[in-house]
Image (cartoon, grey):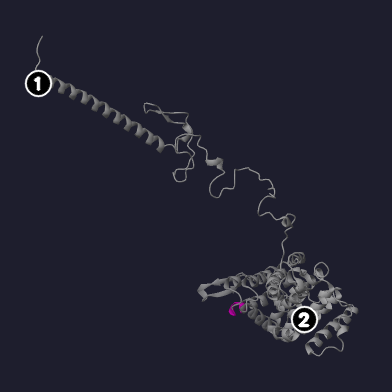
Amino acid sequence: GVRVSTTEKRRVSDVFNISQTNCKVRVFTFRIHEARLKAKAKRRLRKNSSRDSGRGDSLSDNGDVVRGTSATPTSPKSKLLDRKSRLGKGRGLPKKGGAGGKGVWGRSGEVYEPEEVDEKDPNYDEAQENCVYETVVPPLDERDFEKTVTPIVQEYFEHGDTNEVAELLAELNLGPMRGDVPSLAVSLALEAKASHRELTSRLLADLCGPVLSRNDMENSFDKLLRELPDLVLDTPGAPQLVGQFIARAVSDQILSKSYVEGYKGKVDCEYTRAALDRAAVLLKMNMGGLRIDNQWGTGGGQRPVIQLIKEMNLLLKEYILSGDSKEAERCLRDLEVPHFHHEFVYEAIVMVLESKGEKTFKMVMQLLKSLSVSSVITVDQMRRGYERVYMDIAEINIDVPRAYFILEQFVDKSLSMGIIDVKLRDVCPCRYVRTFFPQQGGAYLIL
């Protein structure tokens, strides 16, 4: 029964509206806060999805992170190189099972079967269905022939394996240049050593048949005889050497016996005539018992030691008679045994010990000095030669009573000429003990 004025009713209505509005604001604020928490949890989950994608993490309706089964992270550290899912779902496997991406040819272990030809393909050509593809090697021209074959021959001079040369030549398409192989090999051998010429003769004998025919050999030697005027400019002894090659080829049956006779009365060049005359003389000597297969000799490393010692003794005897040290140096180089030069030094010193006059003493000393200066005999080989004499001096003294005295003089002279050093002089054996007395002015007293 209490009357309420209109003003009071308005006040009560305003208070009720205000409280209702405040409640709505509070609910809205709470929902915004809840949405922020969920968004933050999702961002955290997405950030760790590349490392923990195998765990199977997910969000609940309340925004809580639900952890699944833990797994060892196997993805790369960088997000740019990560090929796994970013959604936090899946098994963490690479895309397309590892068969996709740049530079990938398919899944590992996948075997491709022969692709069947589609006859309905607009690019299908029936004429190409039964095609056979083969590798075609173009024939060599003259310039490419020299660039290709010259290294093969030069390498053969090092290893001496004719089978390897035959295999390399068989892989080349020589074409019309096939007959130039012997002439190129011989022209290279003319400027090489005697052992290389022997290797060249063996190479021609082994190539005749499997790689080259006898007709190719004859054409090649014909070319050599025509080119002799040019070869003489680089090798003055080319006519004699080519004649020896021809005689060796006839002896090895890669040239016919009538090859030299076929040129009689048909030669105008003096160099060609000299080569054919040399070949004819060697063939006649072969009929008399001379073995042409040994005309070039054998390389130093392939010779017997006894033969090398005989040749060194002969070299020393010829030097004592002629006195030409340059010729002795050339002959020692031609032996091609730098590892055996200590034997030459040994034989030279023994010859001095066994000689009676001073002529041999002086000439051998000059020869060793010349060979030492020109480095034909190295310091190591020279030292080994002297040391070998030191070791055998006791036995040498049995036949040569004055061997100790002569050796001491020879060693002192060698030191003064710079052939040996002081250390090698000090170890020289003496028949008597020498004692040094500094009180007597540095004199030696023989006891």
The x and y percentages for residue 136 are 72, 64
Question: Magenta region's main secondary structure?
Answer: helix
The x and y percentages for residue 179 are 78, 74
Q: Image quadrant of residue 217?
A: bottom right
Q: Quick check: can you spot residue 121?
A: yes
Asked whether, in this view, residue 46 is left or right of residue 390, the answer is left
Q: Image quadrant of residue 208?
A: bottom right
Viewer-nearest residue: 79 or 363: 79
The x and y percentages for residue 162 are 77, 67
Residue that label 2 marks: 224
Residue that label 1 marks: 7
Crowd band around label 2 with a 10 angstrom C-alpha radius: few (<14), some (14–19), many (20+): many
**Direction top: furthest residue:** 1
**Direction right: furthest residue:** 288
The span picked out in magenta is 412-417
Examine the rendered structure and indicate whether residue 349 appears above or below residue 37.
below
**Labels 2 and 1: the sequence-earlier one:** 1
Q: Image quadrant of residue 436?
A: bottom right
Asked whether, in this view, residue 321 is left or right of residue 32, the answer is right
Secondary structure beneath disc 2? helix
Asked whether, in this view, residue 273 is left or right of residue 126, the answer is right
Secondary structure beneath disc 1? helix
Viewer-nearest residue: 424 or 184: 184
What amino acid type should be assigned to the residue bearing mark 1? Answer: Thr
Quarter that holds the C terminus = bottom right
Crowd band around label 1 with a 10 angstrom C-alpha radius: few (<14), some (14–19), many (20+): few
Mark 2 vs 1: CB contact within 8 A: no
